[in-house]
Image: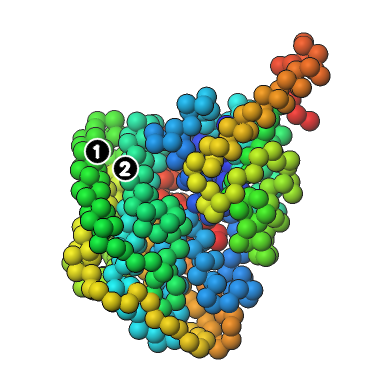
Amino acid sequence: MKRTIIPFGPQHPVLPEPIHLTLTVEDEIITEAVPALGFVHRGLEQLADLRDFRQMVQVVERVCGICSMMHAMCYAQGIEGLMEVEVPPRAKYLRVIWSELHRMHSHLLWLGLFADSFGFESLFMQFWRIREKILNIQEATTGNRIIVSVNVIGGVRKDLSPDQIRWMLSELIEVEQMIMNLGPTLFDDYTVKKRTVDKGILSGEKAMELGTAGPTLRGSGVSQDMRTLGYAALNELDFTPVTEKNGDCWSRCKVRFLETLQSIDLVRQAIARIPNGEINTKVKGRPDGEIIARVEQPRGEVFYYIKANGKKNLDRLRIRTPTFANIPALLTMLPGMWLSDVPVVVLSIDPCISCTER
Amino acid sequence: MLHFDCGSCNGCDIETLACLTPVYDIERFGVINVGNPMHADILLVTGTVNPRNKKVLVNLYDQMPNPKVVVAIGSCGLSGGIFKDAYNVLGGIDKVIPVDVYVPGCPAKPEAIIDGVVMALKKYEVIKKKHSDSVPSRMKWRKIAP
């Protein structure tokens, strides 16, 4: 059979972000996929030379708009570890609340885009309608819809009033109800099963070997979640990582769906146990030494390496994001797939290109 | 309307997508998101320009039929924003293609984006009228950008 080369991206209706895949196709079956990256590269790590370590919080938030809270939290935790700052307990709980809200809005966004990738547009609209409720909560509590910008080194900038907490809980009940109503549509539908079950299979051993992270790994039955490390206040909250066994697109979808509900539960637990007190501490001096910080993002483990030398600017800032870890898995999943399944499989790893390229 | 992410942090992109969903619903102004630049009249661009995506952006702009309007979204699209000093950033969208409407914000809110698109629509009508006066009628549908 003659080989055909089909370019996929960088501008493609199914992708909100530019990634280019060169797909080699034999009779509509993919034999090879080669990615081309670099469309969104900004050179953000280098900005550490120009901005001081406090300003970098705002810069690392713009690594990725969808998971900005986690990036800033990870960076702040790294710097706090270097400077041996004790964050007040209330700030830790507030960080958990906002980061879990972020996870919810990211997963709902993904569930919508995933539904759109196999042409289920009404489901896309439904998920994004629910997501607006979460964004309303974020806007009401922090002042911005997406890039919430609440983290500072030594704590958080904003506090939650009792009124806001009461309103948030009542909104979350509604959100949970709406998500539960969409569950049967997503998981019992014949068409959805036909498009997702047994597509893009990744076994647990292969996933570990390729170093995948997050829901892509948990969808293959490996229970690995950085939240179990107990950063912020997570060591005082109860949860078990969600896993699914099959390792196909359907399992990855189910993991993210259940994680959304788990996040609602975590927010409730955090609100129930939140102590009173200060929300940030004064930080004096400059960081010195090197440290690694890890946080679970909606897409998996994000890893920060920070090297400082007691000056205003950091020596080196290195960010490794989950999508970077998941791209090799994507490339092993694609060969053998039908060309029409490419959008579903590409989206099933939840690609975040601006994270990957920074 | 065609949306292209030209190196933004996703913030403005998902806000642009949010405009298409029921809560904001930009379709009530007669705007539909298309995937093909040849079907588009309005180009929404988010994010900074770098040497690599510059070519893609110019290519997309050239493929759009005349008349066309460009909306730059977000601080990065306007001037480079927070990434202005980064080594791989050339600056705002207007360094590469002419921009008609600027929507500020980091990230720009859906209300602001809708406002920008509606302004672009008004501008489009004006340009279209001028354009149809200047092009002979038999050439109207064949005029493609150089």
The residue under label 1 is A182
Is A23 left, or right, of A210 in this rendering?
Answer: right
Q: Nearer the viewer, mark 1 or mark 2?
A: 2
Q: Chain of mark 1?
A: A
Crowd band around label 2 with a 10 angstrom C-alpha radius: few (<14), some (14–19), many (20+): many
Residue B19 spot, x, y in % from top left: 47, 38
C-alpha span from label 1 to label 2: 10 Å
Residue type at mark 1: give it: Leu
Displayed quadrant of residue A98: bottom left
Q: How many marks?
A: 2
Task: Determine which of the numbered discs, if any, sits on residue B31 in the image.
Answer: none
Q: Earlier in the sequence, mark 1 or mark 2?
A: 2
Relative image position of residue A295 (x, y in whole percent): 37, 69
Residue pictured at 41% horizontal, 45% vertical:
A347
Residue A30 placed where, x, y %? 47, 40
Looking at the image, which residue sits at the far top?
A: B138
Which residue carries the number 2 mark?
Answer: A130
Which residue is found at the position 25% from the left and 46% from the top? A175
Instruction: Please state if A198 lies on the left or on the right of A307 as rendered.
Output: left
- Label 1 in the same subunit as label 2: yes
Look at 29% across and 63% down and name the residue there.
A161
Q: Nearer the viewer, residue B71 or B140?
A: B71
- Kindly indicate whether the residue at mark 2 contacts the one at mark 1 (C-beta within 8 angstroms): yes
The residue under the point 52% across, 60% down is: A62
Q: What's the amino acid at mark 2?
A: Ile
